[in-house]
Image (spheres, rainbow, N blue to C red):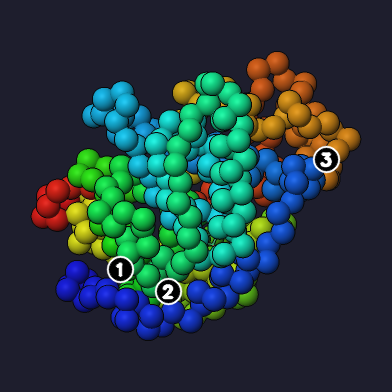
Amino acid sequence: GQDDAAGGDDEEAQEGAANTHVVASHYNELKEGGRRDRQKSKIFFMRNFNNWIKSMLINEYMALIKESKRVGDALRVLDMCCGKGGDLLKWEKAAITHIICTDIAEVSVEQCQRRYQDILERAEKSKYANKFTAEFFACDSTLVRLRERYKDVTLQLNLVSCQFAFHYCFESLGQADCMMRNAAECLEPGGYFIATMPDAYEIMRRKREAGPDAQSFGNDVYNIKFDCETDPLPLFGAKYQFHLEGVVDCPEFLVHFPTLVKLGRKYGLKLVRKTTFADYYKEALPQGRNLLQRMSGLESIQPQRCANDDQFAHVQEFQASQRGRPLGTLSKSEWEATTLYLVCAFKKYKNTWDA
Ligand code: SAM
């Protein structure tokens, strides 16, 4: 079956990896806008919302890990495809002790390292801040065995996080196998691998909804255009061009979820959660309402600074309401774009046959 076919050494991974340099140069060339630029963005609220989802997911699994630990125990994390380090503050808040940050885009890894230095400097000045050690390197997680790049090759991790990036490995079986092994092989039994990625079922549902003649589908913030045979879809290399207003414009691949689960099992990972963003929002809202309000950034933005009427209306609506309704802050287009994604979590077992 699938398991037997998944050989997965680095050589095999390289076969068919034709798009990784396109993805790398796309992310390398992305400009880092300041907070002001971000506030003007059409997807300002969606970015904040996605950050909230990531925070809730990280907190949920860090809490489970901490249940089995004593105060003062090491908490080590791998942030695979870390980008510019948008999650560093979340790791600081989670009181981790060590992080490994890696991404294919060198420029992003440098920015991530600078962001970490800033956090450290601030921590030096404050006696309450959590100090944690870190290592950084640029590499392709779908082609390279990450462990060989760690300062300590015997390092045991408690959590591996891959946010908005795992789907890039579904270009070929070799790449998906390599990325999954990277996620799993250094995890301590009882540790977790958590991820957010596009939901292939939802993408195909919207494609069908758009009709057989539609070349592409989406709205004013996102667009998807298929670049492969879709009837039937291939298990790997189900390529589409993804455009997200001002942030993403590059080839992506559908993740065939049953195959992802099988690959996980091969490396001792058992699926413990697969939830669409729409459902995770509902589930996490009771505990996360205050955080969402703080993260939605509405306290700091003025209606006159909004980029368009849509945002203006939403800010006004928010300000007019007494309790604040988080959903009211996202435009319909942003909500449609964010609900393309799902969260998932895998637990590491000691023996592959337990997973
Ligand atoms: N995880 C970060 C976050 O949540 O802010 C960044 C997400 S960004 C949408 C996707 C990231 O995946 C980019 O930084 C990109 O460079 C990285 N990436 C894509 N393909 C990769 C690969 N083969 N190996 C390592 N990183 C990759």
Q: Looking at the picture, how far across and down is residue 297, in whole percent?
A: 69, 32
Q: Is residue 329 shown above or below 105?
A: above
Between tags 2 and 1, which lies in front? 1
Seen from this angle, which residue lies furthest top? 322
Please state if 235 lies on the left or on the right of 5 as rendered.
right
Q: Is there a contact, CB below 8 Å, between mark 3 and mark 2?
A: no
Seen from this angle, which residue lies furthest right? 304
State the residue at coordinates (77%, 21%): 320
Q: Looking at the picture, how far across and down is residue 232, in whole percent?
A: 39, 77
Q: Looking at the picture, how far across and down is residue 90, in whole percent?
A: 51, 36
Q: Which residue is mark 2?
A: 171
Per the model, the C-alpha gap separating discs 3 and 2 is 38 Å
Tag 2 or tag 3, which sits nearer the N-term?
2
The type of residue carrying mark 2 is Glu
Q: Is residue 192 visible?
A: no
Seen from this angle, which residue lies furthest front? 124
Tag 1 or tag 2, which sits nearer the N-term?
2
Q: Is residue 34 shown above or below 184?
A: above
Q: Which residue is mark 3?
A: 306
State the residue at coordinates (64%, 44%): 46
Viewer-side residue, 280 vs 77: 77
Q: Which mark is residue 204?
A: none
Disc 1 packing (10 Å; few <14; some 14–19; many ≥20): many
Per the model, the C-alpha gap separating discs 2 and 1 is 11 Å
Disc 3 packing (10 Å; few <14; some 14–19; many ≥20): some
Viewer-side residue, 119 vs 13: 119
Q: For disc 2, does the CB lie below 8 Å from ligand 1?
A: no
Secondary structure at numbered mark 3: loop
State the residue at coordinates (46%, 67%): 139
Q: Which mark is residue 177?
A: 1
Disc 2 packing (10 Å; few <14; some 14–19; many ≥20): many
The type of residue carrying mark 3 is Cys
